[in-house]
Image (cartoon, grey):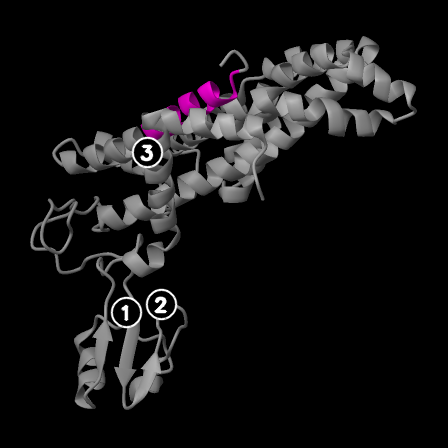
């Protein structure tokens, strides 16, 4: 589908912002790689050939009996026993580049955990013997997916609330503004701490709690656009022709309001990642053992003798947030009506 002239100009303006353009591609590349984390870092082989048959342990669980073992338990492919069973009939295993998952413990460490970087663990291990690089890859995916989901959901609610306030004005706007003032004054962190003492946090629980407050960031922007747009000539003409309020809001005012909204998206995404990292660092985020960059930062704080923990998490967070800021700057320049 061909782009309109104004969208072509916006795309050209975005592409002209070199940091944002290359940052977008680098961020998307890293995100796509993290989506296939199981193919990059896993304690199960990608492919197993045994007795003329093919097995894909990374996608399906197989018992020991499938390879000639004695017990119907899930096969442990790293054990010498399983290797002997597979190699006895000329079989072989294809392992991912990092033969550890985010929760795999390296029981063959030559030094106490946390172990420094080595040929087996490229970024070392944490204080439980888990591979840091694997946890960083999975943690990157969890952070971005959480932030994307929260940003999209909060944007839908924020745009809808701002549109209703700005279009109808009057008592709707007055009551909405007073509600926002009260709701935004609630101590979010204290509420999370209190709720965490009753319910064990998880991905969806955190998402729901953060969604209660994150939607307010776009309300004022959208409200201002609708307050301005509802009095324009083409909106009055549409109303005079008998068009309903819903159609006027959706077809005539919302597209203009989304121009300013799009410039805020990368910065909302950045804030969501920072919030999740802070909660994990404080111990009120994802459940213990989850791949979390904030939990890795907390381990670095508790293990100052293992600087690779804090440095790895900080480097990934700094790269992720820097790329998002660059993308946000490019989007702001592309959608700026003055340009």
Q: Closer to the N terminus: mark 3 or mark 2?
A: 3
Disc 2 designates what residue?
A: 58
Query: Are circles 1 and 2 on residues that touch, CB within 8 Å?
Result: yes
Q: Badge 3 is on which residue?
A: 22
Residue at x 21%, y 90% (from the top left corner): 89
Q: Return the residue nearer the eye: 21 or 185.
A: 21
In the depicted structure, whether residue 143 falls above or below residue 18: below
Magenta extent: 322-336
Callout 1: helix, strand or loop?
Answer: loop
Asked whether disc 3 touches disc 2, contact meaning CB atoms under 8 Å apart, the reply is no
Is 309 left or right of 164, judged from the image as shown? left
Q: Is residue 159 magenta?
A: no
Q: Residue 298, how many percent across, how many down?
A: 29, 32
Residue 326, given in percent of the width and then of the height, sits at 36, 25
* Residue 45 circle label: 1
Judged from the image, the secondary structure of the residue bearing numbered disc 3 is helix
The dot on residue 76 is none
């Amino acid at each position: 589908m061909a782009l309109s002239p104004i969208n072509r100009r916006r795309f050209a303006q975005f592409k002209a912002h070199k940091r944002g353009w290359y940052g977008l591609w680098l961020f998307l590349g890293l995100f796509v790689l993290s989506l296939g984390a199981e193919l990059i870092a896993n304690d199960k082989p990608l492919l197993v050939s045994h007795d003329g048959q093919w097995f894909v342990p990374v996608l399906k669980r197989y018992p020991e009996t499938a390879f000639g073992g004695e017990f119907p338990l899930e096969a442990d492919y790293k054990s010498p026993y399983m290797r002997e069973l597979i190699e006895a009939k000329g079989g072989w295993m294809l392992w991912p580049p990092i033969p550890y998952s985010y929760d795999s413990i390296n029981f063959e460490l030559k030094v106490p955990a946390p172990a420094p970087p080595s040929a087996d663990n490229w970024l070392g291990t944490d204080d439980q013997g888990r591979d840091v690089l694997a946890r960083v890859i999975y943690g990157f995916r969890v952070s971005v997916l959480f932030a994307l989901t929260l940003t999209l959901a909060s944007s839908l609610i924020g745009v809808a609330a701002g549109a209703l306030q700005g279009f109808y004005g009057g008592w709707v706007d007055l009551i909405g503004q007073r509600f926002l003032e009260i709701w935004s004054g609630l101590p979010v962190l204290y509420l999370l701490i209190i709720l965490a003492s009753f319910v064990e946090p998880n991905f969806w629980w955190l998402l729901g709690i953060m969604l209660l407050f994150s939607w307010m960031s776009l309300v004022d922007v959208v409200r201002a656009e609708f307050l301005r747009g509802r009095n324009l000539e083409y909106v009055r003409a549409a109303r005079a022709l008998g068009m309903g309020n819903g159609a006027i809001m959706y077809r005539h005012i919302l597209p203009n309001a989304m121009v300013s909204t799009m410039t805020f998206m990368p910065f909302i995404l950045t804030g969501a990642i920072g919030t999740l990292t802070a909660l994990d660092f404080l111990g009120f985020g994802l459940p213990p053992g989850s791949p979390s960059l904030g939990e890795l930062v907390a381990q670095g704080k508790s293990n100052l003798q293992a600087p690779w923990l804090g440095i790895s998490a900080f480097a990934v967070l700094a790269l992720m947030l820097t790329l998002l800021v660059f993308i946000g700057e490019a989007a702001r320049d592309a959608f700026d009506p003055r340009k």
